[in-house]
Image: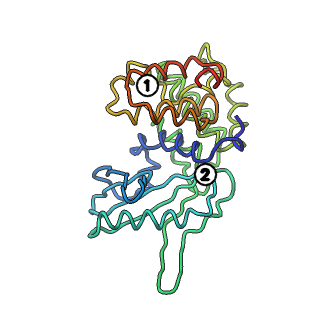
Amino acid sequence: MDQQNRHPQDIDITIKNIILPLLESKLMRDIIGIKYKRELDSVFKTTKERRVDLLLELEDDSILHIEFQTTNDNTMLYRMFEYYSLIKMEYKEKTIHQKLIYLGEDKCNMKNTLKDSKLYYEYELIDLKDFQCDDLLESDNMADITFAFLCNVRNREKLFRKALSKLRKLPEQERSDWVGKILTFLNVRPKLNEEFERVFKEEPMLEIPPLTIEELRKSPFTAKTVEQLEQEATLKTKKDDIKSVILIKFGVIPKELEEKIETTDDIQTLDEMFKKVILAGKIEEIL
């Protein structure tokens, strides 16, 4: 589905679910700066629940909060300030750092400073389009190569062909998984998407039968089997996986379907729902 017709928050959820397992990539290490000790609980319960994208305890005992954003949001400054307040209340003696990572194609126009009377607040805003990462082209780590699609690489042709060459050497299941991740990233960068599709079609080294480029676009980025899902520890993971697959295949989650997923707390039912989503040719078959 066209990027403009997809709900920005839904896209952000999909992107976040791809990025969080890749914290050890060089790009994320560069952005974080200091090595982190552990990931902290990202949920804050006040009068209503608030959840941040990523919360890390760093080696210097400070706290790093990271948000991912694929579209401009004129409320982001106030959201970040609210998150800061919630985090500071929880970790009163800790130094709090905040970074917003913007992944979108449009020019970033969000504000990151707030001045009001005697108040001054600021968070770090990173537009990945301006983040120089040519060195990622020298990496053999698939996470580094995938992230390079979102940041500033001077030789896009080299990036595309290296990605395809690397993908060719991967086992079929892992290869399909990484292609799905790359195509998901490209959904927020339509201009790059056109370039990549051209190289993809020209590249003789890569064959992923029987999937076509359009079928790959619809494939779940997680590429998880039902057996793998059964090993997941929580209902939340299962629900997130189902929603992510729906977003990759159909581009949007109808409100009634999202409510159905969120109100289902039976693991077997969620497993059956996941199978149904995988096999569905159109979203009406899931409702």
For mark 2, give the secondary structure. loop
Q: Which mark is residue 152?
A: 2
Q: Quadrant of the N terminus?
A: top right
Say how the picture is coloured.
rainbow
The percent position of residue 17, horizontal first and vertical second, equals 47, 40
x 67%, y 28%: residue: 200
Depth check, front residue: 271 or 209: 271
Q: Earlier in the sequence, mark 2 or mark 1?
A: 2
Mark 2 vs mark 1: in front: 1
Mark 2–mark 1 Cα distance, whole angstroms, equals 40 Å
Q: Amino acid at mark 1?
A: Leu
Q: Residue furthest bottom?
A: 117
Up-down: is 238 above or below 97? above
Callout 2: few (<14), some (14-19), or many (20+) C-alpha neighbours within 10 Å? Answer: some
Up-down: is 165 above or below 92? above
User: Is residue 188 rendered to the left or right of residue 36?
Assistant: right
State the residue position of label 1.
Answer: 270
Corner quadrant of residue 66: bottom left
How many numbered marks are there? 2
For mark 1, give the secondary structure. helix
x 31%, y 58%: residue: 58
x 66%, y 22%: residue: 282
Q: Quadrant of the C terminus?
A: top right
The percent position of residue 39, horizontal first and vertical second, equals 32, 49
Q: Amino acid at mark 2?
A: Asn
